[in-house]
Structure formats: C-alpha cells, structure tokens
Amino acid sequence: MNLKSMTLPELTAVLKELGQPQFRAKQVYTWLHKGVRAYGEMTNLPKSLRDTLAREYPICAPKVVRRQESARDGTIKYLWELSDGNCVETVLMRYHYGNTVCISTEVGCRMGCAFCASTIAGKVRDLTPSEMLDQVLFTQMDSGREISNIVLMGIGEPLDNRDNVLKFLGLVNHPDGMHIGMRHISLSTCGVIPGIDFLAQQHLQLTLSVSLHAPDSETRSRIMPVNRKYDVEELFAACHRYFQATGRRISFEYAMIDGVNDHDWQADLIARKLVGMPGHVNLIPLNDVVESPFKPSHRVAAFQKRLESHGVTATVRRSLGGDIDASCGQLRRKAMEEKEGAGEP
Ligand code: SAH
C-alpha cells in the first residue's frame, strides 16, 4: 500500500486507524507531495509515527537511470527506474508559456500503432497514480524548473489505465499538493471510445487530445489497430458527444506520414467531420522510428493550408529535443536493446 497514491480522505482513514488526529493526514500529504524521500524529513511529525509509517508504508521514489539534455532547446529527457525495476520516460520541454512535462501512463503500450516506438514490445503493466505523480514531482525537483503544464502523451494509453489516471489527476490538481490547474493538463488518447465517454462525464477542465492520424477507416485501421475496434466514424461521434457534454474544444493530433495520410482528400474529409464542433488540428512531423516502414511527409505545409481553406485551425507542432531521442518510447527502447544486447554472448 502506497500512501502517495492515496487521496487525502483515504490517507486520513489510514492515519485514523493509527490513532492520529485529523490534521496529521494533511501534514503527511503535503510532505509526500513535496517529494520527500524519507519520513525523517517530515519534521513536524512525532518520531514514533515516523517510525511506524517507515515500517508499514515505505516511500517509493523513482531513480534516474538516464538524463539527456538537448543542447538546442533545453529539453530534458528522463529515463526512470521504478521500484520493480521497470523503466519509463518523462520529457520536460520549455515553451514561452512555461515548462511542460510529458509523462508516461503505462509501462509499454498495447495499442499497437504502426509508427510508434512505445508499443513495439507491448504493455507490461499500468502505472499507479503515485508513479505518474512522481514523474512530475521528481522532474521538477531534479531540473529545478517549476512545472506549469502536464501532457499525458508519453508511453502508454491513458484511457487504458483510466482509474489510476483519474486518481492521478485529482492528486496533482489538489491544493495541498502540486496544485496544477486542470486547464494546464492535456490527456491524449488513440481513441478508446468508452474512455472518452467516461471522461466526458467527469466534466474536467482538461484538454482532450485525440490521436486521429487518419480520417478514413481504411487508412486508420492500417496504421492504428484500435480503429478495428473503435472505428473512426464512431470516434468522431464520440468527439461530438464530448464537446456537447463539456463545451471543451478537442485537439486532434495528426502525424504526417508520407503517402499514407497526407492527401488533400483526407484534409477535406477531416474538415467535413469537424463541422459543428470547434476542433484544432495539430500536425506533427513524423518522428522517424528505425523499426517502422513509415517516413515523414513533405506535405505538412500544403496539408495545413488545405485544412485552413475549410476554416479548420491547424498548427504544426514544433519539434523539440530532436538531438536526444526525445519522442515517445525511443529512449526506453534503446535501454531495452542495450540490456538485451548485453545478455548475448
Ligand atoms: N496513447 C496516447 C498517448 C501517447 S502517444 C495516444 O495515442 O494519444 C502521444 C502522441 O505521439 C500520439 O498522438 C501518438 O500517435 C504520437 N506518436 C507516436 N509515435 C509517433 C511518431 N513516430 N511520430 C510522431 N508522432 C508519434
């Protein structure tokens, strides 16, 4: 049982069991969310309580296995080792509006997108709420840069681990914790429709990003196996429902792949599907993943223009950390390959 994954009421119940007054829970919660690594640092707690907690509820904190900083733009990429030896990545990016951290939500991913490095070796397990929080917390502590924004766009599919993700959002948003505003958080999904409907019911102020990557079933099923279960037609319908329920504009991610999803007719189709809903399309120059047969498109600007000609707002994502393998799953894959390689004669 990990205290850092608990809500304040849950923590209050645990401390009550230990015969502690109500105000202790808030003290412990505040310390845990400051990133202390040992109960000894919780100086306003009685020594006996610190000893009991240390015995029964060890504090987990990830270890930095690798830290790479881009000489070009200051992007920092962390590879963390979790308490069970698994590794995940976190990326810290600097924008004019502040520091954004991109966190992982699962160890690996089972969604199988054909262009993505995170999914190649499948999913190992879900991350716990505290393991997501720790990525934000320890990235801030290690870098010394205050984090203002969070994107759930690292390794894993957030809506494939939705209960832990929802709990994490509550923790990181809490006034006695890091207190990062929901409006400063984006959650990205490959299109898990029941998860989108579930999220709509929560009425959170976060930004939903949908990894669209193709507006037609045939192309989308080819590059994203999730489309065979949740077809893009139904996905657009779910997006409309989400907008109706929350009034929040959805951001659509679109990695431009040469000859696959970069045709004008696909831009036209996107525009048709977004009628009645203020969407924003974020065009992403494809990151070349060595294992993937797909290559970056040269039609990014033309595609953007075509979307705009229909009145759809489209931006091209600035690429950061290109010199440090900073995109999803690439660092973890490298580390895995080196481990495998080291095991060979
Ligand atoms: N599973 C979630 C979040 C993680 S991926 C999702 O699919 O949205 C974060 C974003 O990076 C997604 O839009 C994903 O499709 C995109 N992505 C993955 N591999 C990429 C690559 N090689 N080039 C560009 N974008 C990529």
Image (tube, helix red, strand yellow):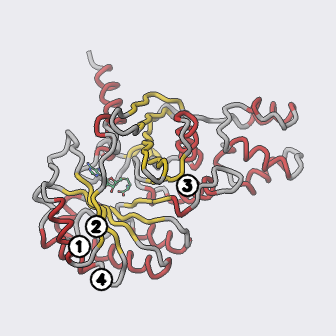
Quadrant in which the C terminus appears: top left
Circle nearer the N terminus (1, 2): 1
Given contact means CB atoms under 8 Å apart, are the residues at marks 1 and 2 in contact? yes
Q: Amino acid at mark 3?
A: Asn
Give the SS element for disc 1.
helix
In the image, is 59 to the left or to the right of 265?
right
Question: x, y (%) of residue 78?
Answer: 44, 35
Q: Which residue is mark 2?
A: 314
Q: Is residue 53 above or below residue 4?
A: above
Q: Earlier in the sequence, mark 3 or mark 4?
A: 3
Residue occupying the far top of the picture: 345
- Is there a contact, CB below 8 Å, between mark 1 and mark 4? no
How far is disc 1 from disc 2 in space, using C-alphas? 7 Å
Q: Nearer the viewer, residue 199 or 97?
A: 97
Query: Label 1 belongs to which residue?
Result: 308
Mark nearer the N terminus (1 vs 4): 4
Pointer 3 residue: 164
Q: Name the amino acid, label 4.
A: Val
Q: Secondary structure at mark 4?
A: loop
